Amino acid sequence: MRRIVSSIEAEYLRYKTLAEGAIQQLGDEDLYRKAPGDGNSVATLVWHISGNLASRFTDFLTSDGEKPWRDRESEFVHRTVSRADVLKKWDAGWEVLLGALKPLTDENLDAAVSIRGIALAVHEALHRSLAHTSYHVGQIVFMARSLLGKDWQFMSIPPGTGARRAGAAFSR
């Protein structure tokens, strides 16, 4: 059975779609523009998310989630790259994650995996990774919205269009 695993997979895909919607709205040069205060660019965040997903989910059930071949520090080096490079890197990390999730069942959730030598149940590792990924996707969305200003296209309910209806049952 895959009831729980499918719900986790769906959440990952929701955040993947959210980031892709933000990235799609940006101009090519916006992808490597640094955030204020020497913050990360969208490209840097993509490199980090992809590196993290590839490391954590390569041989997910059989090897430590922090692979010796991962160079985490290099993920945060500022880079000027093309949109095609950003999307290729993005897809590479997600391909590893989704490939690792595909054979999982709810029966696997209590199995043990390790990250940096720390034992975790599969469900703990998945939730930890999902939280990490959603945190950085939020940064991508915030960066894109900040760069686009009034040209930002909302990917959920735009402000002023649903709050009154949603809160009507609770108003007095």
Image (cartoon, grey):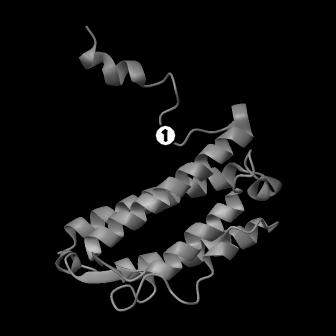
The image quadrant where one finds the N terminus is bottom left
Q: Which residue is mark 1?
A: 156
Q: Extreme top residue here?
A: 172
> Could you say which quadrant of the image residue 20 lies in?
bottom right
Tell me how many marks there are.
Answer: 1
Residue 168: x and y in percent read: 30, 17
- Percent x, y for residue 92? 58, 78
Identify which residue, 166 or 114, lies in the foreground.
114
Question: For the residue labelled by badge 1, is the local secondary structure a helix, a strand or a loop?
Answer: loop
Q: Nearer the viewer, residue 139 or 73?
A: 73
Point out the image quarter for the C terminus.
top left
Asked if residue 76 lies left or right of residue 141, the reply is right
Asked if residue 22 lies left or right of residue 98, the reply is right
Q: Position of residue 80 (x, y in %)?
A: 82, 66
Q: Quadrant of residue 56?
A: bottom left
* Circle 1: residue type: Ser
* Crowd tier of the residue under label 1, counting other residues whose Cα lies within 10 Å: few below 14, some 14–19, many 20 or above: few
Whole-percent x, y for residue 14 in the image: 44, 56
* Residue located 54% across and 56% down the image: 136
Which residue shows up at 82% across the image and 55% down it?
A: 29
Q: Is residue 58 above or below residue 132?
A: below
Give residue 31's quadrant in the image. Answer: bottom right
